[in-house]
Amino acid sequence: MFARPHGLICIILAFTICVVRNTAATKLSPDVTALWNLRGMAKCKLHLNALAYNNYGCWCGVGGCCKPIDPIDDCCMHHDKCYEAAAAEGKCYRFPFAYFDPYAWRCDHGTIICGDNRSPCKAALCACDSAVVNCWARYHRPLGKPRCRH
């Protein structure tokens, strides 16, 4: 017969259902929910997809280590450290759960404005994401994706 699902699979499924249900109940647009926030902020401020920075250097993307290769990579390192600080201070759950906590923000003519995020986690995540996009805005768009040299 079939094996019973492992506990982790059940937890992930239950969590996903709660996120989807919460998103549907509050009628948030895709640009103000969890993983889509950074994408939307990059579109707002930079007029490009945040994926342009994925797998760039040592820090942009999943994980991170070593010394950043350049200022863009440094922005990503600070973003990772910002999320880590929010978790360490008890404002948010640890990775990857913080990435699924939707928060409110809006775009006003290229300016990112965090909304009324009543939880400390939502406020921290919005601040982290807007900070990395504002940091990226100080530099030219990456034309390639240099790899970590460490």
Image (cartoon, rainbow, N blue to C red):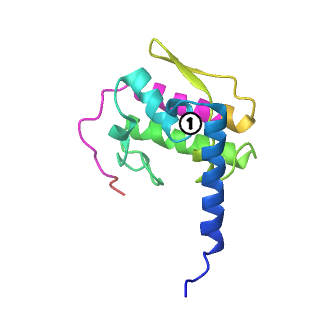
Q: Position of residue 23 (x, y in %)?
A: 61, 38
Q: Nearer the viewer, residue 11 or 25?
A: 25
Q: Is residue 138 left or right of residue 91?
A: left
Which element type, helix, strand or loop, lies under badge 1? loop
Q: Quadrant of the N terminus?
A: bottom right
Q: Residue furthest left?
A: 143
Q: Residue at x 59, y 68 (%)?
A: 9
Q: Position of residue 130 (x, y in %)?
A: 53, 28
Q: Residue at x 42, y 45 (%)?
A: 60
Amino acid type, residue under disc 1 in the picture: Thr
Q: Position of residue 83 (x, y in %)?
A: 60, 43
What span is colored magenta in the figure?
A: 124-147
Q: Is residue 74 left or right of residue 3?
A: left
Circle 1 residue:
33
Task: Note whether residue 73 is visible.
Answer: yes
Q: Residue at x 63, y 33 (%)?
A: 103
Was residue 35 drawn as part of the magenta stretch in this picture? no
Task: Note whether residue 137 is visible.
Answer: no
